[in-house]
Image: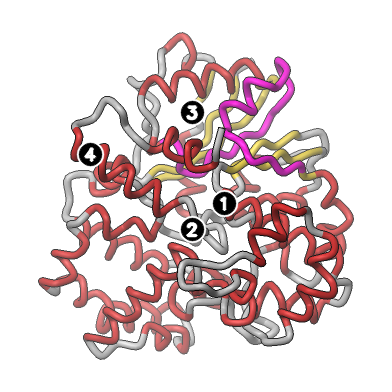
Amino acid sequence: MQPNTLIEGAVVRHESPRSARLLDRAFAMAFKGLVYAQIWEDPVADMAALDIRPDSHVLTIASGGCNALSYLTADPEAITVVDLNTAHIALNRLKHAALTHLDDYAALRRFVVEADHPDNLATYKVHLAPHLDEATRRYWEGRDLIGRRRIEGFSKGIYRKGLLGVFIGLAHAVARLYRIDPREILAARDLEEQRRIFDERFAPVFERRMVRWLTDQPASLFGLGIPPAQYDALAGGQKMADVLRARLEKLACHFPLNDNYFAWQAFSRGYGRALEAPLPPWLQEGNVPVVRERLDRITLRHANFVHVLQESADASLDRYVLLDAQDWMTDGQLTELWSEITRTARPGARVLFRTAAEPSLLPGRVPDTILSRWDYREAESVRATADDRSSIYGGVHLYVLKA
């Protein structure tokens, strides 16, 4: 099956009215390129909820690849990483090559953390390209819609690229229309000052008529990777501007900036440059040797999550990370997914996922004959939601297979 067909099959609601199907197909078209240069689910919150152990076999969606690499710090036996998106697979393979072949931490940091240095093109050509498979090289050495080689993103700021990078750039442009520089909050010295800057500078923007109109258009959030099916769940009956203001408030005010690289990505369009700036676990200098040593435990597949489950043996997996993919699914797709998860799950298996809205979306949509075999861990879910520094999801949910 071709990549575009894989994505369209996952996103398009064929039973919906024609107008909804057209919007779904527009999202599928936007989603076929690079969406996330960095994944936007907090791996630290994930690992606390997943309770990864030395015999754990994790199955996760790849996205930008950061979380699967960070899970290696928890020492699982194996991680299978899947994604429908060709660009995300190519990005994951490039990050794996950088870890393997850039022995010097300064070179790795320049290529992946700074990701905008002109020397990165030579680094790619000499140290990385010879070790990549043909499909990955073809992707990075191919050209984007305006004729630039994609690998040039690593010499000009890869975190400004992709659907989300462009969305954040447009959000910065809108802020500047109202004479706000989003980077100013990064100078705050403590949580109290973060709160003051947000309340005085950022919150009023969401009351502007243009902002409220823009965010009422489902296509305006394609850059966040939010398909039309997820838009309504995210709104939850509220005005979208109010929902987005609440999510940004958590990102800006609930966590110290020296411990939240998601805030740096949102407000500066990249990681902080100071050596003490926060980074994902896999990129922290003290963790790089162990991540590099365990890298061969990751199997990367360009495939549908359900299809990988169907190929897996009974009771062969015990940690599942679905990101927010279920928000896109019909009841039939959810039932098929959870039937396969239940079949492949070992005793005590854990499933972690996120939702745009606050509550779990499974009750009433997955048959009780399946869902009754799982224990919803409400307290742990509430804690994981509160601890998720990315702050863009309404809920983080944990289910554990009953004995």
Between disc 1 and disc 4, whose residue precedes? 4
Residue type indicated by callout 1: Ser
Q: Which residue is mark 2?
A: 35
Label 4's element?
Answer: helix
Describe residue 55's horizontal placement relative to residue 241 as left or right: right
Q: Tell me, yes or no, whether the highlighted magenta stretch contains residue 24.
A: no
In the rendered image, residue 304 lying in the magenta stretch gets the answer yes
Q: Nearer the viewer, residue 377 or 96?
A: 96
Looking at the rendering, the stretch of residues picked out in magenta corresponds to 299-326
The answer to which quarter of the image holds residue 331 is top left
- In the rendered structure, which disc, 3 or 1, sits on the residue that comes first in sequence? 1
* Dot 3 or dot 4, earlier in sequence: 4
Question: How far is mark 1 from mark 2, CA to CA?
Answer: 8 Å
Residue at the spot of label 3: 376
Location of residue 111 (image quadrant):
bottom right
Q: Earlier in the sequence, mark 2 or mark 3?
A: 2
The residue at which mark 4 appears reads as 20
Please name the amino acid that badge 3 sits on: Tyr
| Cα separation between marks 3 and 1 | 25 Å
Say left or right for 295 vs 348. right
Residue 181 place in picture, x, y as percent: 35, 88
Instruction: Specify the label residue 333 is tagged with.
Output: none
